[in-house]
Image (cartoon, helix red, strand yellow):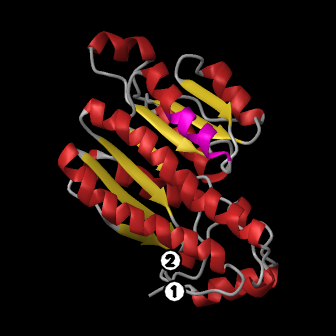
């Protein structure tokens, strides 16, 4: 498996410890693949300690645990098990002593017409895409309050701002996530915590892997920039919102979609 090594110019772990600067800690939900994996890779390479969860381990989580034994933490957690989600945040805070960044990345996409969607399926979609981030955010933000600051980035979807057939329940949950971000920005801002939402359009990911070539061309044709986004471009936007370069930005939703919603 080929995974990038530490970036040139990034200080080694022992150098960072000698400097006396507290090690920054990030929690990334769904960090075993796709966007979450890219964020985990980049943050580890930049000297962060990173905790993540997914339903199952894979080759990447095994590699990261071996390469960064002191800085990487993974657990198997199901998004629909809200108690486990909350406890994960608490365990990370105890293990690393602080939480500086939370990215609510994990989610599930289910396409089905609203009139045929079973009530149980609705509950699962809302739980995974809205309730789980709520519970994880509360758990992690309490640690941020103790550390006197932090950043929360919620990953929404353009389904929350533009209507599409077959994703009504998913869109409702993601819209709730955007509302959460605006309200929390008001509530947590005085405590030094910034909260923003990133709203990606169509980009190459596990969620779009089943899009047919014909539909992919239609999406490209409707997109002013004429292509789908890349996971690296979405990760760049997330890391911007998490960086000091955006330290006067809070309560906002940044749409990164090549202009398809304009």
Location of residue 170 in the rendering, given as x and y in whole percent from the top left corner: 63, 72
Q: Is residue 85 magenta?
A: yes
Left or right position of 87 against 98: right
Along the line of sight, the residue nearer the viewer: 195 or 31: 195
- Disc count in the image? 2
On whether residue 246 falls in the magenta region, the answer is no
Compared to 260, does 229 lie above or below? Answer: above
Residue, disc 2: 258
- In this orientation, which residue lies closer to the viewer: 38 or 129? 129
- State which quarter of the image contains the N terminus: top right
- On screen, residue 257 versus residue 81, left or right, reads left
> Which numbered dot is residue 224?
1
What x and y, as percent, mark residue 35? 60, 52
Q: Classify the position of the C terminus by image quarter.
A: bottom left
Question: Can residue 54 be seen by looking at this rendering?
Answer: yes
Kindly report the secondary structure that dominates the magenta region of the rendered protein. helix
Question: Which residue is located at x 58 percent, y 29 percent?
Answer: 5
- Which residue is at the front of the view, 134 or 197? 134
- Asked whether the residues under the numbered discs 2 and 1 touch, taking CB atoms below 8 Å apart as contact, a structural biologist would say yes
- Earlier in the chain: of badge 2 and badge 1, it is 1
* Residue depicted at x 44% and y 30%: 48
Q: Dot 2: what SS?
A: loop
| Residue at position x 35%, y 17% in the image | 16
Range covered by the magenta-colored residues: 81-89
């Amino acid at each position: 498996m080929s995974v990038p090594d530490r970036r040139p110019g990034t200080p080694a772990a022992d150098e960072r410890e000698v400097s006396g600067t507290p090690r920054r800690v990030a929690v990334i939900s769904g960090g075993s693949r796709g966007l979450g994996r890219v964020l985990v890779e980049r943050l580890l390479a930049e000297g962060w300690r990173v905790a993540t969860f997914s339903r199952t381990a894979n080759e990447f989580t095994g590699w990261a645990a071996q390469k960064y034994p002191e800085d990487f933490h993974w657990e198997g957690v199901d998004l629909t098990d809200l108690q486990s989600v909350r406890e994960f945040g608490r365990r990370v805070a105890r293990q690393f002593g602080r939480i500086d960044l939370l990215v609510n990345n994990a989610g599930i996409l289910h396409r089905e017409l609203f009139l045929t969607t079973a009530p149980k399926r609705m509950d699962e979609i809302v739980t995974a895409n809205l309730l789980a981030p709520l519970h994880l955010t509360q758990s992690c933000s309490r640690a941020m309050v103790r550390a006197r600051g932090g950043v929360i980035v919620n990953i929404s979807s353009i389904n929350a701002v533009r209507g599409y057939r077959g994703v009504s329940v998913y869109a409702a949950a993601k819209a709730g996530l955007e509302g959460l971000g605006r309200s929390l920005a008001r509530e947590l801002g005085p405590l030094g915590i910034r909260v923003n939402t990133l709203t990606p359009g169509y980009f190459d990911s596990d969620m779009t892997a089943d899009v047919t070539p014909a539909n992919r061309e239609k999406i490209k044709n409707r997109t002013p920039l004429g292509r789908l986004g890349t996971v690296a471009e979405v990760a760049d936007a997330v890391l911007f919102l998490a960086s000091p370069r955006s330290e006067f930005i809070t309560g906002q939703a940044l749409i990164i979609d090549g202009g398809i919603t304009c």
